[in-house]
């Protein structure tokens, strides 16, 4: 238990680990998916999985927003960034995501005016102060981030800022989970529900998991003790044959979500019929685009976006990682051709990506030994 | 960009636009707090909030804020990157 001393409450960590040990049934294997990249990060950083009995396996899900952007959309972003007069803005992590012919960082080196911003409101500020240029914001993220883009668009509309537009790649959390549950590759026993996404959507949208698939879900905080407690809650449900949504993170996540944020999402966005996810393919009703009332701000209508679907590089196994089918180190290029400095796949780019988290916390060598 | 970092509301920059100055571990920047406003209780000076890409995402108590900060600081480089990105921010 070498990491427990770094826990906020090491004593509680040990107690929970003991209770988990006492709760698991021998001869039974438990496969629990943590949906959210933030959880993946905490698990590796604090060695949470080292505290679990051998028959409790944590697998990593599709909840890292950078990881799920398909190559074709990065190519589209680069095409827009090269349009004359455009200032293209994006979050720092997106700069390093590979498209089929390089990253946004490479495009910047080629002369495109690409700027990292902390917030969509910073992109809007740039538009306001450079009215002679067109400013495009590369919007990515789940329901956690989408309200920020929505509020920024509302403000742009109110202020009548005409040189601002959004290349929208927002996605929603429920459809990929349903797709995973329908996939024959993976047999899961329960979910550690996402933390930040749930502050917006609430725990209620996860109710389909117990209702339709008979599996427990526990919305969890990010402290290692939160994750241990959530695992324990899932195991207890499984042992008595129960399945329901529980909220371990009630101190931050209201069961009903953030009503104001949900209203703004409904006003500014509408669902696309389908959207492509890296490694997961097209998932219906999983992506957001700007609603009719905001069409003037839609970069996909303002520019000729190539919209070509590009297959992932052969060596890349991000799809399997995002589905929890393989562990990062099982990808053939992990740590060799694919590193955080020179990522091949998206899961190595963001610190929330399973491959980057694995790599950064030196889990690579030890896991190889185990194999 | 995936982190939600805790900060404390120290003053309103523009009440009607719901722009407030927050202090995040000594870094003071403007963010939008409208997502934590409710009809019963609008965001107030002194509130602790989790901040994501320039917006307060949820209201937390001081203990939760401190624990979150400690955990993020332990992340090292990733947290530093996030703070540096926040430092570059100049929301108006
Ligand atoms: S090691 Fe690289 S290519 Fe392989 S799954 Fe991870 S990110 Fe994708």
Image (spheres, coloured by chain):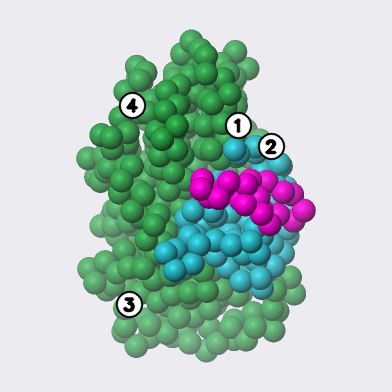
Chain A color in figure:
green
Residue located beneath label 2 in the image: B88
Residue located beneath label 4 in the image: A296
Q: Residue at x 72, y 64 (%)?
A: B70
Closer to the chain start, of discs 4 and 1, is 1
Closer to the chain start, of discs 3 and 1, is 1
> Which numbered disc, 2 or 1, marks the residue closer to the eye?
2
Q: Are marks 3 and 4 in contact (CB under 8 Å)?
A: no
Q: Toward which corner of the image does residue A104 lie, by quadrant?
A: top right
- Crowding near pointer 3: few (<14 within 10 Å), some, many (20+)? some
The N terminus of chain B: image quadrant: top right
| Marks 2 and 4 on same chain | no
Residue located beneath label 1 in the image: A116
> Which numbered disc, 2 or 4, marks the residue closer to the eye?
4
- Badge 1 element: strand
Classify mark 1 as within 8 Å of ligand 1 or not, answering yes or no.
no
Label 3 – label 4 distance at C-alpha: 43 Å
Expressed as whole percent of the image width and height from the top left, the position of residue A141 reads 45, 45
Residue located beneath label 3 in the image: A244
- Badge 3 element: loop
Residue A115 visible within the image: yes
Expressed as whole percent of the image width and height from the top left, the position of residue A152 reads 46, 39
Expressed as whole percent of the image width and height from the top left, the position of residue A105 reads 60, 25
Q: Are marks 2 and 1 in contact (CB under 8 Å)?
A: yes
Expressed as whole percent of the image width and height from the top left, the position of residue A318 reads 46, 43
Is residue A277 located in the magenta-colored stretch of the structure?
Answer: no
> Which numbered disc, 4 or 1, marks the residue closer to the eye?
4
Residue closest to the eye, A34 or A8 = A8
> Main structural element of the magenta stretch: helix, strand or loop?
strand
The C terminus of chain B: image quadrant: top right
- The answer for which chain carries disc 2 is B
């Amino acid at each position: 238990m070498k990491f427990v001393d770094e826990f906020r409450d090491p004593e509680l960590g040990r107690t929970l680990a003991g209770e988990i040990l006492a709760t698991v049934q021998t001869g039974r294997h438990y496969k629990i998916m943590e949906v959210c990249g933030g959880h993946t990060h905490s698990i590796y950083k604090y060695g949470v999985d080292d505290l679990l009995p051998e028959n409790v396996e944590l697998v990593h899900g599709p909840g890292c927003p950078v990881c799920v952007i398909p190559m074709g959309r990065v190519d589209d972003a680069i095409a827009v960034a090269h349009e004359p007069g455009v200032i293209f803005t994006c979050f720092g992590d997106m700069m390093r995501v590979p498209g089929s012919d390089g990253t946004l960082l490479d495009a910047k080196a080629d002369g495109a005016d690409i700027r990292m911003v902390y917030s969509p409101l910073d992109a809007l500020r740039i538009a306001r102060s450079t009215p002679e240029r067109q400013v495009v914001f590369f919007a990515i993220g789940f329901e956690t981030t989408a309200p920020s883009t929505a509020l920024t668009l509302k403000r742009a509309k109110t202020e009548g800022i005409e040189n601002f537009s959004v290349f929208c790649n927002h996605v929603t959390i429920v459809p990929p989970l349903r797709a995973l549950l329908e996939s024959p590759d993976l047999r899961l026993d329960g979910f550690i529900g996402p933390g930040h996404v749930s502050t917006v959507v609430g725990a209620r949208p996860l109710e389909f998991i117990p209702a339709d698939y008979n599996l427990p879900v526990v919305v969890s905080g990010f402290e290692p003790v939160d994750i241990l407690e959530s695992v324990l809650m899932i195991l207890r449900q499984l042992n008595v044959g129960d399945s329901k949504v529980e909220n371990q993170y009630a101190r931050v996540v209201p069961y009903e979500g953030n009503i104001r944020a949900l209203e703004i999402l409904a006003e500014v966005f509408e669902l696309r019929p389908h959207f492509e996810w890296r490694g997961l393919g097209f998932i219906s009703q999983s992506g957001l685009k700007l609603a009719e009332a905001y069409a003037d701000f839609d970069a996909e209508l303002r520019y000729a976006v190539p919209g070509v679907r590009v297959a992932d590089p052969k060596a890349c196994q991000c799809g399997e990682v995002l589905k929890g089918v393989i562990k990062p180190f099982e990808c053939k290029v992990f740590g060799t051709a694919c590193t955080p400095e020179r990522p091949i796949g998206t899961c190595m780019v963001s610190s929330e990506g399973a491959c980057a988290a694995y790599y950064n916390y030196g889990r690579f060598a030890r896991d190889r030994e185990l194999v | 960009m995936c982190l939600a970092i805790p900060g404390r509301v120290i003053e309103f920059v523009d009440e009607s636009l719901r722009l407030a100055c927050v202090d995040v571990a000594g870094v003071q920047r403007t963010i939008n707090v409208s997502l934590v406003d409710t009809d019963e209780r609008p965001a107030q000076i002194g509130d602790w909030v989790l901040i994501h890409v320039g917006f307060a995402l949820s209201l937390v108590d001081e203990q939760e804020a401190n624990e979150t900060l400690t955990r993020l600081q332990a992340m090292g480089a990733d947290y530093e990157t996030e703070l540096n990105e926040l430092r570059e921010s100049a929301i108006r």
